[in-house]
Amino acid sequence: MQRHTTEGRAVTELILEIFRLNGRLLAAGDRLTEDVGLTSARWQVLGAIALAESPQPVSNLARTMGLTRQGVQRIVNELASKGFLTFDDNPHHQRAKLVVLTKKGQTAFDEATKLQVPWANQLAERLPEKELAAATRLLRTLTQRLELERS
């Protein structure tokens, strides 16, 4: 059986820590956005829509988020049923509708963001900005490698 290199062991430890962090971030996001009527998953999808330069079909949102189209479609459907989203015709594709925030959806995203800012500021207290930037660069590099591997 092949053994990890030193770097392979280190990246495995990092991945396991990311999994633990992801679980805690999802739980924290659920608590943070509960009064807004969102979950972490719904907030994440609303954010992808709100931050996109123009309305996008579900497949583009899923690609941007690194998730499956089916998973994002399920959440988009939930959000639409609650009045957070609507669908517009897509001039480039007859069946792939464009996902658009409603006023209710924009308000929910804005309220969630207002709650997130002080939470993030508190979480970041006494963490060196340079280390946070280095961690972000490392995670981006791993993401890019995984994306290249997939294609």
Image (spheres, helix red, strand yellow):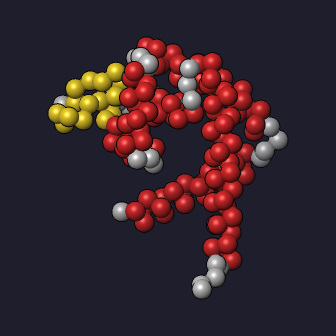
Q: Is residue 101 above or below residue 12?
A: above
Side of 87 where 61 appears, left or right: right
Can the viewer see residue 117 in this picture?
A: no
| Quarter where residue 102 is shown | top left
Residue 22, relative to residue 28: is it above or below? below
Q: Between residue 121 and residue 106, name the one nearer to us.
A: 106
Side (left or right) of 60 relative to 30: left
Is the residue 44 above or below the residue 144 in the image? above
**Residue displayed at 22% across by 30% down:** 90
Q: Quadrant of the C terminus?
A: bottom left
| Count of number-bearing discs | 0
Identity of the residue furthest to the right in this view:
126
Q: Is residue 57 left or right of residue 22?
A: left
Q: Residue furthest top?
A: 103
Residue depicted at 72% across the width and 26% down the height: 118
Horizontal and vertical percent position of residue 1: 60, 86
Please name the residue shown 38% across and 29% down the image. Answer: 77
Image position, residue 20 (x, y; %): 68, 51
Q: Residue at x 55, y 54 (%)?
A: 140
x and y, in percent, of residue 43 in the image? 53, 30
The image quarter containing residue 119 is: top right
Where, by quadrant of the figure, is residue 58 drawn?
top left
**One can see residue 98 in this view:** yes
Asked whether, in this view, residue 88 is left or right of residue 11, the answer is: left
